[in-house]
Structure formats: C-alpha cells, structure tokens
Image (spheres, rainbow, N blue to C red):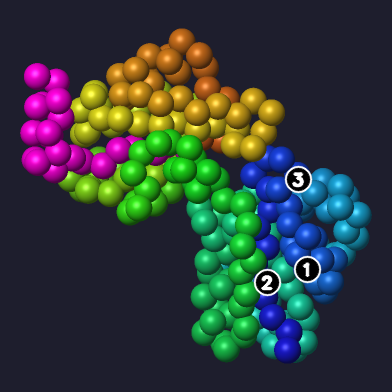
Amino acid sequence: MAKLTVVPTPVGNLEDMTFRAIRVLKEADLILAEDTRTTGILLKHFEIQNRMQSHHKFNEHKTVEQIANRIKAGENIALVSDAGTPAISDPGFMLVRECVRQGVEVECLPGATAFVPALVASGLPNEKFCFEGFLPQKKGRQTRLKELSTENRTIIFYESPFRLVKTLTQFVDFFGNERQVSVSREISKLHEETVRGSLEEVIAHFTQNEPKGEIVIVLARLKSKKEKEIDTDNLM
C-alpha cells in the first residue's frame, strides 16, 4: 500500500544520511521538499533523480488534502525539509495530520535532528527535557519565558545566530545570570562548536565572538530547594 514517508536529512555533514533514507528517496514517486534548490543539492550528491515538488510553510495548508489523496490513489510520497527531521520546527505536521485523518499510512524514518546531539553534548541532565523550538518573536514571548522560569526539566531552544545574544540576555531576566547553559552551533559541520557556562559567561563569549550557523540552546532546569542547599554546603 502506498504511504507517506517522512525522511530526515543531514543537518550538516552529508555522511549522516542513512542508506535507508537514500533508498526511500530513490523509490519515491514524488519528493516533497521545503526548498527544492537545497534538496536538489542533496539529491544530486546521492544521484537521486526523482521528481520534486515544493512543500513549505506558505503553501502546505493548501495542498495537504490533495497530497493525501494522491497517496490514496497509489503514489508513494517522501517528505523532506532543508535539514533534520520534517515537522520538528519545520513544515510537515499538517501533512502528517491530514494523512492520519484520511487513514493514509505514515512512516517516519529515524535520523538527524539538531537538538539531540546538542542535548547530549551539553553535559546537562537529559533524562527529562522540554523542547521549545523557536520562541515567539513578539506576542506571547515574555509570557512563555515566565512560565518556563519554574520548569524543572532541561529546556531546549532553537535560535537564529543574529538573535542569540539578545535572547540569552533576555534569559537572564527570567532565569538569572548564573543559570547554566550550553550553546551548540554548526552541528556536524566543519566548524561545530559548543560553548558551556553560566548565562553571563556565554553571553560574554558570543558578544566577543560573533555566532554563525544554526543554533541550539540547552538551558539547565530550575534546581530544587534541596539541590540549592547541597550546592551551598559544597561551597562551605
């Protein structure tokens, strides 16, 4: 039976592409791409010549029903985004939801997503975490940060390099300048970097060193009263 296959693509290093993902893309009747130019580079590298169609946040709400109907008619369709796993802070959710609504089979391949290596490399507790993705730019931003100020799980954010210092500075107002944070950029690429420390220290680093590339922020959770007491005892 035909189905929709969600295919993760590398967030940087093309060697992170799986054999299975390559096979699925080669066998697909149609590949839905966030940006056909970006995906075209990937397909050319792996000698995949299948037909592509644009599927992005500006048109997905108009096309999901039609795409689901095409799968029901027998087409195997693969969905990719520019990097990482579709629907994780990228287009894809609306199409998956429509396919589920219409009883169309959906399969998501395991593969690259930026926040997992950033979380693991942070050195912060990762048994429980809260993924926030991109914060609202204006409306609701401060309200959300206030809600997160009492979050007792490690918190993960995506951010633009152009807004990183401003966002970290805003975090100080809600989390305090001593809250521990880890900022990873250019994950799996040649100039991959992870900077760890207090918010104050990491702000100072990126104020002096202009950040470039895609950014993942991993912020420490709020410590319990007991943990704070233990920290105080260790300093004495």
Q: Quadrant of the C terminus?
A: top left
97 up-or-down from 148: above or below = below
Question: What mark, if any, has residue 111 been given in the picture?
Answer: none
Q: Dot 2 lies on which element?
A: strand
Return the residue at label 3: 15
Binning the other alpha carbons within 10 Å of mark 1 as few (below 14), some (14 to 19) or many (20 upward) gives some
| Residue 198 spot, x, y in % from top left | 31, 24
| Residue 184 spot, x, y in % from top left | 50, 33
Instruction: Tell me if label 2 and label 1 are in contact, CB under 8 Å.
Output: yes
- In this view, which residue lies farthest toward the top? 208
Q: Nearer the viewer, residue 204 or 181?
A: 181
Q: Residue at x 15, y 30 (%)?
A: 231
Magenta-colored span: 216-236
Q: Is residue 73 left or right of residue 86?
A: right
Binning the other alpha carbons within 10 Å of mark 3 as few (below 14), some (14 to 19) or many (20 upward) gives few
Asked if residue 48 shows in the view, the reply is yes
Q: Amino acid at mark 2?
A: Thr
Q: Is residue 22 magenta?
A: no
Q: Quadrant of the N terminus?
A: bottom right
Question: What mark, if any, has residue 5 been given in the picture?
Answer: 2
Q: Residue at x 50, y 48 (%)?
A: 116
